[in-house]
Image (cartoon, rainbow, N blue to C red):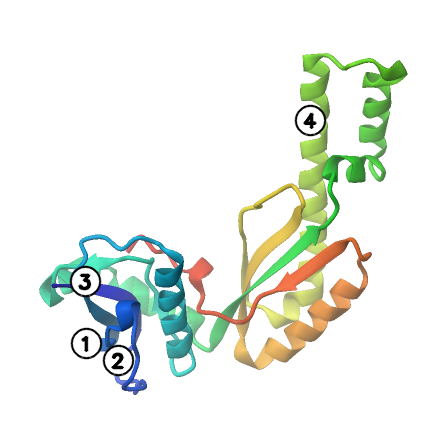
């Protein structure tokens, strides 16, 4: 039977004795010098990222986060036994300790700004002079644009979209700067997503961050939606390739 690894915390921290992970397996601490790895028994050679498994993993990390700062491991990280785990993590323990020091007392928030309409290209044409000029020229008189014209129009749209995203992110960070210690941009699931950013936030600024996000959100029309996640372990600020 192998070990499923959830994350690493500072050694010596008392956690609830009833912690469970995937398949309701009890979670225990495995001492690694000044750190401790949270593990549970696992008899599967590979853990599929099914919804239930991901929820169990996230719920465990969230509950641990109520008592300790944790460096989360990537989902499904397995070791054959305790010796294999020590061998695997040993070379990375110093880096993990430094990372744990960096994130101590902080949690991750994810903020998204999403345009909720159906046709994002048509939306931007209304506000971008160059896009509107090209649209009018290429579709003049009801004609169909050539393939080269379509490609050109698409490139201009993409350039405008990237500029808009950069401008909005800069505005957002200017508002939130005093409440966060770091941020990283995440991928964009669709062209409607104008901001998708993870932020590392000290616990004592949670309330200030949420209030500032409310102020930022108030400046956008109703066809924009702003989403702010609940605080979570700092997934986006951890190098999972340890």
Q: Position of residue 82 (x, y in %)?
A: 12, 67
Image x and y of residue 57, in percent: 35, 66
Who comes first in sequence, dot 1 or dot 3?
1
Mark earlier in primary sequence (3, 4): 3
Which residue is drawn at the image coordinates 67% and 27% (left, top)?
155
Instruction: Give the Cα distance between marks 1 and 3.
Output: 12 Å
Whole-angstrom CA distance, mark 4 to mark 2, is 54 Å
Horizontal side, residue 237 vs residue 170: left or right = left
- For residue 140, side relative to residue 188 (left or right): right
Say whether marks 3 and 4 touch (CB < 8 Å).
Answer: no
Q: Is residue 157 above or below residue 188?
A: above
In this figure, which residue is indicated by the disc labeled 4? 154
Question: Which residue has dot 3 on it?
Answer: 90
Q: Quadrant location of residue 130?
A: top right
Crowding at mark 1 (Cα within 10 Å: few <14, some 14-19, many 20+): some
Q: CA distance from mark 4 to mark 1?
A: 55 Å
Residues tagged 4 and 2 counted as in contact (Cβ below 8 A): no
Q: Are marks 1 and 2 in contact (CB under 8 Å)?
A: yes
- Between 221 and 67, the one lying in front of the other is 221
Identify the residue at horizontal 60%, vertical 77% (top origin): 205
Judging by the rendered image, the residue that carries numbered circle 1 is: 31
Residue 166, image x, y percentages: 67, 47
Give me the residue at 66% from left, 73% from top. Answer: 210
Q: CA distance from mark 2 to mark 3?
A: 15 Å
**Disc on the earlier residue, 4 or 1:** 1
Dot 3, how many residues are within 10 Å of its Cα: few (below 14), some (14-19), or many (20+)?
some
Q: Position of residue 126 (x, y in %)?
A: 85, 37
What residue sits right under mark 2 in the picture?
A: 11
Image quadrant in which you'd find residue 234: bottom left
10 Å crowding of disc 4: few (<14), some (14-19), many (20+) = some
């Amino acid at each position: 039977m192998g070990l499923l690894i959830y994350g690493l915390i500072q050694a010596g921290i008392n956690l609830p004795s009833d912690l469970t992970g995937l398949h309701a397996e009890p979670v225990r601490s495995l001492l690694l010098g000044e750190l401790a790895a949270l593990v549970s028994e696992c008899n599967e050679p590979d853990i599929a990222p099914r919804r239930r498994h991901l929820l169990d993993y996230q719920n465990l990390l969230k509950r641990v986060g109520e008592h300790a700062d944790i460096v989360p491991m990537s989902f499904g990280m397995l070791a054959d036994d305790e010796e294999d785990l020590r061998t695997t993590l040993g070379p990375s323990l110093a880096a993990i300790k430094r990372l744990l020091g960096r994130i101590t007392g902080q949690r991750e928030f994810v903020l998204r700004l999403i345009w909720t309409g159906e046709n994002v290209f048509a939306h931007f044409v209304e506000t971008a002079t160059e896009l509107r000029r090209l649209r009018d020229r290429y579709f003049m008189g009801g004609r169909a644009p050539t393939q080269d014209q379509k490609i050109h129009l698409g490139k201009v749209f993409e350039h405008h979209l990237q500029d808009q995203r950069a401008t909005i992110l800069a505005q957002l960070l200017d508002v939130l700067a005093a409440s966060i210690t770091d941020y990283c941009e995440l991928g964009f699931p669709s062209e409607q997503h104008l901001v998708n950013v993870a932020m590392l936030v000290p616990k004592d600024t949670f309330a200030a961050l949420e209030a500032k996000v409310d102020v930022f959100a108030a400046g956008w029309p109703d066809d924009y939606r702003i989403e702010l996640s609940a605080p979570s372990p700092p997934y986006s600020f951890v190098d999972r390739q340890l």
